[in-house]
Image: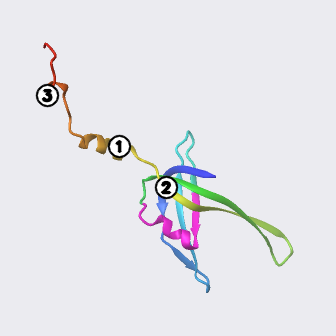
């Protein structure tokens, strides 16, 4: 499953428990009629995939939906869901495209020495 949107929040890596479990969360805002703010967590070695990304960038995240059951001391089952990212990639923004177009040197056919047009 893929999620496309802009990075709204990019949290630092958290280390939880005695075993050194690592988790890093990012909030992505989708661009649709009713934008959604989706929390995606990256765990363990996948936390490092978020290094180099900043708020405002448009990204595509490959993710998995995870669910688990927990039975409380009274014997009642509760269910929890998680959205876990396992890959992230930058989507080319218009800014980078427009900057590359501005860097190109303008050319004119009038300056071409092989131009033999009569005007």
36 left or right, relative to 110:
right
3D distance between C-alphas at marks 3 and 2? 42 Å
3D distance between C-alphas at marks 1 and 3? 27 Å
Q: Pointer 3: residues within 10 angstroms few (<14), some, or many (20+)?
A: few
Residue corresponding to mark 2: 89
SS state under label 1: helix
Report the span colored magenta. 39-53
Residue corresponding to mark 1: 97
Q: Pointer 2: residues within 10 angstroms few (<14), some, or many (20+)?
A: some
Residue corresponding to mark 3: 111
- 54 or 111, which lies in front? 111
Q: Pointer 1: residues within 10 angstroms few (<14), some, or many (20+)?
A: few
Q: Are marks 1 and 3 in contact (CB under 8 Å)?
A: no
Q: Earlier in the sequence, mark 1 or mark 2?
A: 2
3D distance between C-alphas at marks 1 and 2? 17 Å
SS state under label 2: strand
Q: Nearer the viewer, mark 3 or mark 2?
A: 3
Q: Position of residue 117 (x, y in %)?
A: 16, 16
């Amino acid at each position: 499953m893929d999620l496309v949107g802009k990075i709204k929040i990019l949290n630092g890596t958290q280390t939880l428990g005695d075993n050194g479990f690592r988790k890093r969360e990012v909030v992505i805002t989708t661009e649709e009629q009713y934008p959604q703010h989706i929390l995606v967590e990256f765990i363990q070695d996948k936390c490092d995939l978020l290094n180099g990304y900043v708020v405002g960038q448009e990204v595509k995240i490959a993710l998995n939906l995870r669910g688990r059951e927990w039975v409380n001391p009274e014997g009642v089952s509760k269910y929890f869901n998680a959205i876990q990212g396992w890959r992230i990639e930058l989507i080319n923004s218009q800014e980078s495209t427009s900057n590359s177009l501005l860097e190109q040197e303008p050319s004119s056919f009038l300056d071409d020495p092989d131009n033999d047009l009569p005007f």
